[in-house]
Image (cartoon, coloured by chain):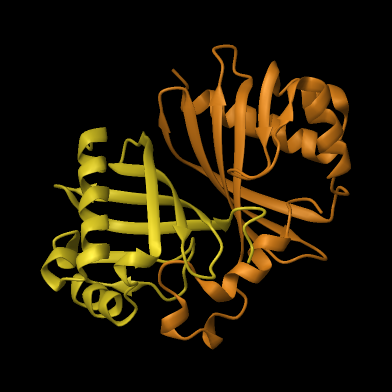
């Protein structure tokens, strides 16, 4: 059973690791066999401490070039749903939704990120393009990876 | 308190309305003052069931072009159901991963927000 306090503590450690890019900070976040999904499907997850550190460092952001705001939108069992907004100096802004399954010791067993480029041309969109799948959004949405 | 069964029933009713494009089926899904967001932090959501019905009918998908699979990923304290889904199109559109946040009140959605991402490798 994941608690709000456990998620808050984990999120602060994540932010610290995002800033330091220190492998020890990164591995402390995850169980030894954790899966890190950089998107909901269609990409191989980063597997275990070694895989996660490699992926993390390949996609690392320079400290001071980004900011991140988040809030817990809810919990169910061991799973936390965290919504965030990421602002980068040289990239579009993103909305993020993280699905994080925590083990009893407070480390993550599984992490999955959803991300969408923040709409920067909303006034130009016609109603037709908006419902269902947002065709105009998809160009940016499919090309961008977090941290690239 | 929303249950997984209620969340599933709501999604089933949503998919029936997606097929029927019937105004009564659509309005039955939402509270009178519901907000329908097409993306997180949508600057221009549809507000109210009348606007949702009107918008839905204006932009309806024909029933035979899509396939939709879902699972309830969670039910949160505030009554929000988290629905993860995959929408496949038989036309030239890619496959979408969907995550719906649906806050249910007495079985109707008071707030609906869709997250969507193109499944990698399905761009056509």
- In this view, which residue lies farthest toward the left? B24
Find chain B in the image and tell me its colour.
yellow
Chain shaded orange: A
Residue B8, position in %: x, y? 25, 41
Where residue B61 sits: x, y (%)? 34, 72
Quadrant location of the C terminus of chain B?
Answer: bottom right
Residue pictured at 59% horizontal, 18% vertical: A106
- In this view, the residue in front, B80 or B59, is B59
Point out the residue furthest to the top here. A105
Residue B50: x, y in percent?
A: 19, 76
Task: Specify the quadrant that holds the N terminus of chain B.
Answer: top left
Where residue A98 sits: x, y (%)?
Answer: 57, 41
Residue B51 placement: quadrant: bottom left
Q: Is A1 on the left-hand or right-hand side of B105? A: right
* Label tally: 0
B11 over B3 or under it: above or below: below
Residue at horizontal 19 percent and vertical 59 percent from the top: B29
Residue B39 visible from this viewpoint: yes
Query: Could you tell me which residue is drawn at 59 percent across and 12 percent down?
Result: A105
Q: Quadrant of residue B14?
A: bottom left
Q: Nearer the viewer, residue B27 or A105?
A: B27
From this viewpoint, is residue B32 visible? Answer: no
Apparent side of residue A107 relative to residue A101 in the rendered image (left or right): right
Question: In this view of the protein, which residue sits in the foreground, B111 or A5?
Answer: B111
Compared across the picture, whether A68 is left or right of B105 comes to: right
Instruction: Tell whether B41 sits left or right of A58.
Output: left
Instruction: Tell me the residue at 45%/55% (across/down).
Output: B87
The image quadrant that residue A117 belongs to is bottom right
């Amino acid at each position: 059973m994941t608690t709000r306090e456990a998620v808050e503590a984990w999120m602060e450690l994540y932010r610290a690791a995002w800033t330091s890019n220190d492998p020890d900070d990164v591995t402390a976040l995850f169980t030894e066999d954790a899966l890190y999904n950089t998107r909901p499907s269609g990409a191989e997850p980063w597997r275990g401490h070694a895989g996660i550190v490699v992926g993390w460092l390949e996609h690392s952001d320079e400290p001071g070039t980004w900011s991140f705001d988040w809030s817990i939108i809810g919990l169910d069992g061991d799973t936390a749903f965290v919504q965030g907004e990421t602002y980068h100096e040289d990239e579009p802004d993103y909305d993020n939704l993280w699905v994080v399954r925590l083990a009893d010791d407070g480390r993550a067993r599984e992490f999955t990120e959803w991300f969408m480029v923040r709409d920067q041309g909303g006034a130009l969109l016609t109603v037709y393009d908006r419902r269902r799948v947002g065709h105009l959004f998809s160009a940016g949405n499919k090309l961008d990876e977090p941290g690239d | 308190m929303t249950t997984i069964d209620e969340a599933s029933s709501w999604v089933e009713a949503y998919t029936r309305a997606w097929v029927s494009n019937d105004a009564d089926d659509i309005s039955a899904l939402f509270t009178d003052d519901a907000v329908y967001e097409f993306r997180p932090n949508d600057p221009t959501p549809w507000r109210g069931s009348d606007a949702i019905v009107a918008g839905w009918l204006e932009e309806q998908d024909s029933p035979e072009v899509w396939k939709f699979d879902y699972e309830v990923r969670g039910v949160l304290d505030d009554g929000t159901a988290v629905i993860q889904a995959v929408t496949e199109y038989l036309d030239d559109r890619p496959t979408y991963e969907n995550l719906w946040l649906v806050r249910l009140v007495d079985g109707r959605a008071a707030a609906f927000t869709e997250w969507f991402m193109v499944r990698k490798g399905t761009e056509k």
